[in-house]
Amino acid sequence: MIDFFRYLGICFITILFSWLPLSVVHASSSNFWQISTVPSWTEADLNSPQIGEGLESLEYLLYDAQVNLNLDVVQSFYQYRYQVNDAAGVEDNSDLSITFSPDYQTVVMHKVEVIRNGQSSSRLVEHDVRLVDIEPEKSSKIYSGQKQLQLWLKDIRAGDVIEYSYSIVGSNPVFEGHYSHFFKLGWGIEVKQANVSVIAPNKRKLNHQLIKTDVKINVDKRAKESRYSLSLTDVPAYYSDGDEPSWEFSQPYWLVSDFDDWKGVNDWALGLFEHSPGKSNEFDHWLEELQALPKQTAVEQAISFVQQDIRYLGIELGENSHRPHAPAEVFDNRYGDCKDKSFLLVTALKSLGIDAYPVLVSTYNRNTVRDFIPAYNLFNHAIVRFDFNGNEYWIDPTKNYQATSLNYIVQSSLGDALVVAKGNSSLSEMPDYQAIDNRIIFEQTYKAADYQSPVELLIKSTYTGTQADRMRYRVASKSAKRMSKEYLEYYQRLYPKLSSLQAVQVVDDANTNQLTISESYLVPEFWTIADGEAVFELYSDLVDDYLYIPEKVNRQQSLALGSPLSVYQSSHLVLPQDVDFSSLIAHRSEENDYISFSSSFDYQNRTISFNHAYSNKARSVPPQDTEQHIELLRKARKRLSISYSVTNVTEDEAYGSVAKLVNYLLSLKQTRAAEVN
């Protein structure tokens, strides 16, 4: 859930938003925007290129961002200049969009010009500007009230240079005058000139951090204010390697913040959660019911209620982008986002006499939050920390379908955390998951009565820890019929004539957080019979998913491995007769600092066992180690499947007749099932 502290970095090309508008109306300059000259406090770049070389479909000539904190209201000025050189450039870059929050911001348009053959023409016509209601995070059930000004430029041709500038006036009052911002200094396209600057009064200290760049910060001190600026020429295009962890930057940034330490961020956040819980008879009655229960039962019921009965929905208008709604309001509405649900759970736990606190975390930055200077926009999520019976708990109220017992509930593990508590002045480190606690045990048993008849396939999958949570959610979101159909279709990709013997069976022990799924199928033509030999093949498809080889091997970025988990897959083939496979018994393993993998082939009592185990020891592989790591993956992948044969197989005619009959009945059954569905 990424709803609490959104990144506030400036968008580079605010063009071609893919979000569908809820409504489009002519914008009224008196309500949301106006046309005016460029503010006098800005500095023009007179040396930036005015025209491109015509070598690329789109050439970006100028990106300019200037922020003034030394005014009664914060103002941010932006200027863009780019050239479109062919039909594709015209098609993709002729529409301008400016996103803002009307609850506390207005837009001032300064200039929209098209330069063609050295002649400039203005395209800023008030009647052509449209106001669009957008909800960019609607798919995540978050509503912010953001709007867009859109201008669909007319008569744009190849070779035109488009230049426009505007200011956004205002800032969210929830920040109480503080300022933290990520300025982007690189994009997926070359930029001829990029300028970024911040003006602040001399009495206001700003802290700076450069990320993936060593560009110099210029400081121009004046009588009452200072201008901090960066100027970059011929900025290269930056590309992601793909499959990198979320906390790793592929492009350079400049982080500016007026917080000197984490105590300052904590003190600001305290004010968000210190307002009244509100009044509600039903809410008060719920708290009284909890207080009448044994304490551990009350804690478990409070967590379960907030997770399950308060649906996830973020109404984040104005200050509620960061300030939670009152717990009583959330309780009565039966909905809220992460900060709302966290505040509600903290209030309930405190009513039980338990020390509980809201916690700010980052689902992106994880353990790297401490690598940055203190800032409020490093966080994007809220959870709860509390102490009970001598133990420390980190609970995510937005996680539903978790275990019901406090002893088995999977705690949140998001690395660095800011516990919002009086007097706190530092980050805490949340304990990470252990791979052994998050397991998938996948057992396949093939029972062959002979070498002609369909083979019975029994599958048992057991999930614990985070994997049980994941599967519990998946099971809850699908009907048994739909789930059985999906599983059947998956295995039919491996065995086209496979049919189901019964619907998928689910046994869920939510108390101990273990979920088991059982499946049963018939597999016709499992054996390939030729020249007196019966050939079989076994394949560890589940482990295959975790031995993924990225598209880019020679990497500049780390390779993400995901959360710690352990996967065990066993394929057992019960043979019709005793065949000596003992000479093939083998056990092999591969291991490095990041994963461990083992495979084995065993034979005993007419049963072949083909086993694989995978677990990751880290969440990512650093770039300097990816080459050797990928080589290990390639070795491991070669042992995911086997194909052997049983020789001197007698092809009795009776077997063939029975097989034909069984296959006919299975085909008839599948046809009737398809007609019903």
Image: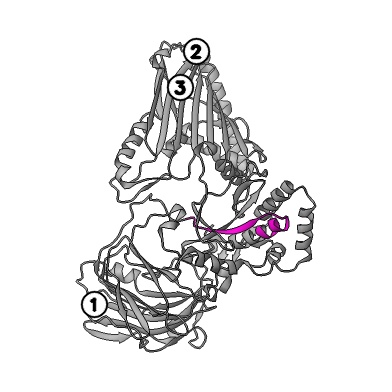
Q: Earlier in the sequence, mark 3 or mark 1?
A: 1
Q: What residue is shown with label 3?
A: 527
Q: Nearer the viewer's eye, disc 1 or disc 2?
A: 1
- Marks 3/1: CA–CA distance: 71 Å
**Residue 653: mark:** 2
> Cβ–Cβ below 8 Å for labels 1 and 2?
no
Q: Nearer the viewer's eye, disc 3 or disc 1?
A: 1
Q: Earlier in the sequence, mark 1 or mark 2?
A: 1
Which span of residues is magenta-colored? 346-363
Q: What residue is shown with label 1?
A: 48
- Percent x, y for residue 611? 46, 26
Q: Give, as a three-letter code, the residue at label 3.
A: Trp
- Marks 3/2: CA–CA distance: 16 Å
Colour option used: one colour
Q: Earlier in the sequence, mark 3 or mark 2?
A: 3
Helix, strand or loop for disc 1:
loop
Of 601 and 499, nearer the camera is 601
- Percent x, y for residue 94? 35, 74
In the depicted structure, whether residue 289 falls above or below residue 600? below
Q: Give, as a three-letter code, the residue at label 2.
A: Glu
Q: Residue at x 33, y 60 (%)?
A: 251
Of 243 and 528, nearer the camera is 243
Q: Residue at x 35, y 30 (%)?
A: 638
| Number of residues whose C-alpha sits closer than 10 Å to that of mark 1, classed few (under 14), some (14–19) or many (20 or more) | some
The quarter in which the C terminus is drawn is top right
- Marks 1/2: CA–CA distance: 86 Å
Q: Any magenta on residue 5?
A: no
Of 100 and 214, nearer the camera is 214
**Residue 393: mark:** none
| Residue 368 falls left or right of residue 332 | left
